[in-house]
Image (spheres, rainbow, N blue to C red):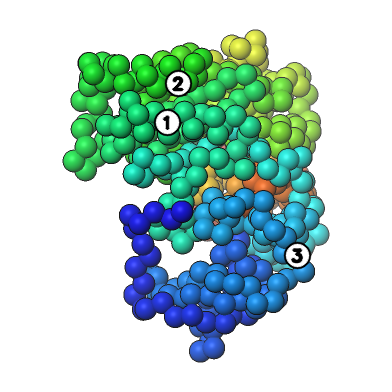
Amino acid sequence: MVDRERRPDPVEPMARAVVRIDRLGRAGMGIGTLGDGRTVAVPKTLPGEEIEADTWVDRRGRVRGRLVRVLRAAAGRVPAPCEHFAACGGCQLQHLAYPEQLAHKRAVLVRHLARTLGPEAEALVAAVEPAPRVLGYRNRNLFRLAEGRLGLGAATGQGMVGLEECPLAVAGTGDLTAAVTEWLAAEGRSWRPRLRGVLVRVQERARMVTLLARVAGGSPRWGELVAECGSEPERGRLAALAARLPEVSLHLAAGGDGTVLVAGGDSAHLAGPERISAQLGLARLSLGPRSFVQVNTEVSDRLYTAVAEALAPMPQDVVLDLFCGSGALAQHLAARGAGVYAVDMDHRALADARAGAVLAGTDRIEWRAGRAETIARRLWQAGRRHRLATVNPPRSGMPRDLPPWLPRLGVARLVYVSCSPPTLARDLAVLRELGYRLERCVPFDQFAQTYHLEVVAVLAHEQPAARMRSVVMPWRANVPQESGASARG
Ligand SMILES: C[S@@+](CC[C@H](N)C(=O)[O-])C[C@H]1O[C@@H](n2cnc3c(N)ncnc32)[C@H](O)[C@@H]1O
């Protein structure tokens, strides 16, 4: 079901067209050509297919299409396991056989890297590490809420597809969403207009539900909403929800723009345990409603293991872990006997990280709050040197002031974990200018059935500190002054 709240508003009226799909775009959409030569993007189609589509021009002037029927199917097409796949925007590749999903993701990565590294990119990218489970793997799911129903954003980018059970979610998620929907239909009716979504986390031994409140644009302010929750009849209504969710950690949070919930922002504990713990391979994590943790526990365990093996730290090493988040990778490194200096700018993420380290009983990690680029400069000013480093920046890639500090800090082996091929390609080109040689890129299929990919890039530098004087940076004005370098060795 697609809700009627926001329909696609075509600038040109919808026209039905027969399209031959030439390739898969980066975001998993089939890209074809219309009779008049314009390019059209049609979700849920495959290269080589001939399809019928309704087409329109979106607000940015791009021609978009919605699949009506497949006239000639590609060899790789398989029946999608989810009945909502055609309309839902939650995943893009269920209609493509799994081995071909992996081949497609590798090709996208190679294409991006080739733009900055040249033809050698092909040889440097390994086959994608497949996921042990291609369904039932997501431990965290964000559902939108409209007219009392939960759902996911529609494939058209407009409106929502109503569903409570997503096949990508780990088992047990549907029980929690069903309980919330029943509450919204009964004792919680008055909460329907107040909520914009629900975030559900299911870990091996613990579960958490976070109600995401609308707190802007005519809705009560956050403080007012929290105060209301403490008064009758709200207390009774929320107690009814807690009764439907026994032993579940229940929170209310300011819903922001309703997109991905990461660390930061307001939240209030309503019922059940305040935090839940999770095991991610060697790491123990302590999670609150805003904590960031990778959604695919099995694949991220393999990925962290690959990072630790690529760095191969010795007991005397102190590995620099920049963008450490809630500290799962830092714990994997510490479990190998290394010291870790872990940095993140988000205080709440670091609070999670510290709590997780206590659960794990490790004292080999020093946590530091601040911007990676600022902390790197301060470490260098203090004369610190780190032979090994790992960076795992957000989708936007490394802040541009960070890379020049890495060779100065003596980083000879660097592992870059990325969820964004375009920014990885950009940053690898910068790192090459700084003297880093890319040894290999190993993609991990952390998000089966979607176009997303997580990549581990392993880099080495022969003479980290020596190379700096000859480097010409694309943003030269931001390169630290050499006089400081000699004064501090
Ligand atoms: C992709 S997450 C890292 C996740 C973590 N490595 C893990 O595996 O769970 C990116 C992290 O970078 C942090 N971050 C973003 N910009 C930053 C900056 N300039 N300096 C330090 N941390 C930053 C965010 O707070 C977030 O925790």
Of the numbered discs 2 and 3, the one sitting upstream in the chain is: 3
Q: Residue at x 77, y 69 (%)?
A: 75
Q: Residue at x 40, y 70 (%)?
A: 58
Which residue matches tag 3? Answer: 76
Which residue matches tag 2? Answer: 244
Residue 341 is left or right of residue 189, and the answer is right
Residue 488 is left or right of residue 49, and the answer is left
Look at label 1 and name its amino acid: Glu
**Where's residue 24, x and y in %?**
64, 67
**Where's residue 367, x and y in %?**
54, 21
- Mark 1 and ligand 1: say if the CB distance to the nearest ligand atom is below 8 Å: no
Of the numbered discs 1 and 2, the one sitting upstream in the chain is: 1
The answer to whether one can see residue 233 in this image is: yes
Residue 466 position (above or below residue 231): below
**Where's residue 43, x and y in %?**
56, 65
Are circles 3 and 1 on residues that touch, CB within 8 Å? no
Neighbours of disc 2 within 10 Å: few (<14), some (14-19), many (20+): some
Q: Choose between 250 and 407: the one closer to the eye.
A: 250
Q: Quadrant of residue 456?
A: top right
Look at label 2 and name its amino acid: Arg
Are circles 1 and 2 on residues that touch, CB within 8 Å? yes
| Count of residue discs | 3
The answer to whether one can see residue 116 in this image is: no
Neighbours of disc 1 within 10 Å: few (<14), some (14-19), many (20+): some
Residue 433 position (above or below residue 29): above
Look at label 3 and name its amino acid: Gly
Residue 377 position (above or below residue 356): below
Q: Which mark is residue 182?
A: 1
Q: Which mark is residue 217?
A: none
**Quadrant in the picture for the C terminus:** top right
